[in-house]
Each structure stands twice: as C-alpha cells, then as structure tokens.
Image (cartoon, helix red, strand yellow):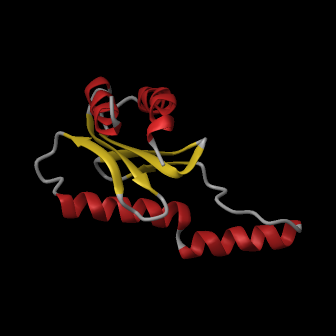
Amino acid sequence: MDINDICAEIVRNVDSALGCAVVDLNSGLLLGVSHNVPYFTQSYLDAVAAAAVDMFRGRTVSTVEDMIGNMRGNLRKNLIKEIQMTTDNTYHFMTVVPDKPNALVVLITSKKANLGMGWSHIRNAVPKLTPLCP
C-alpha cells in the first residue's frame, strides 16, 4: 500500500469526501493524492498544496513563532499541528504527521461531512502514512 492508496481509502470511507493528499511541507510537493472531482487539476492541487504550506510554514507564521520564542526565551518552530478550515462549501482537515513533521495530510470534504468522522479517518490513517513519508 502506498500514499495514494491510503488517500484513496480515506476518500472512499469519509462520506462527502472530495479529496485527500499528503504534502511535503519543505518543498510543497504532493507526496500522494486521491480525489473524485474533475476540476481538481494538477495545477489546482499544486496551488492547494502551496496554500497549505503557507498556513503551516509561511513567512508570517514563522515570524509569529519567532516572536513567541523570543518572549518565552526559547526557540519555537513548527508550532501549528492541526488546522480545520471552512469555506462556503467545504471543510478542510489538515494535520502534520507527528513522527514526520514535514508531512501534512489534507482532507477536503463537502459541508455535508461529519466533522468527527473526517478527523477520525485522517487520524487513523496517520500510523499507516508515517513509514511512507520522508
């Protein structure tokens, strides 16, 4: 089983799932992806991956982490571990793979999805993804 297979399993098992991907937070490259939306073109997927990297590792996030570190007297990096984002029509679940801090799992669903089920499936997939991520 590879990263694409695990992403496909998540999409298959989460009601109203539109797509799932694993993103390399260093490079912004997609490590694996599965979706069932025709307009999720490669350029669209790449743009979503880049936006996710900005949310977790962007310049303003790094600036805030540096400020927190300076106030607390210690180096603080990569503080953000999970984000849930809502748009007009979708939910986005994003979590850093704990043992692979440069790998991010992203699940996109319609707003018909159950939030708990989205988080449950993404978190249950993390142990399977960990050995496959760089």
Task: State the residue in front, 126 or 40.
Answer: 126
Residue 88 position within the rendered picture, expressed as x and y whole percent measured from the top left? 31, 52
Which quadrant would residue 115 be assigned to in this image? top left
**What is the x, y in percent for residue 80?**
61, 54
Q: Is residue 106 left or right of residue 96?
A: left
Q: Report the residue at 33% width, 34% height from top.
A: 2
* Residue under the point 32% across and 45% down: 32
Q: Position of residue 89 (x, y in %)?
A: 28, 48
Q: Nearer the viewer, residue 14 or 28?
A: 28
The quadrant of the picture occupied by the N terminus is top left
Q: Residue at x 48, y 26 (%)?
A: 124
Numbered disc total: 0
Q: Quick one: 15 or 132, which is closer to the camera?
A: 132
Q: Is residue 107 above or below residue 70?
A: above
Quadrant of the image occupied by residue 78: bottom right
| Residue located at (49% from left, 63% from top) | 26
Residue extending farthest to the right is 73
Residue 60, given in percent of the width and then of the height, sits at: 58, 75
Left or right of 112: which side holds 99? right
Quick check: 5 above or below 53?
Answer: above
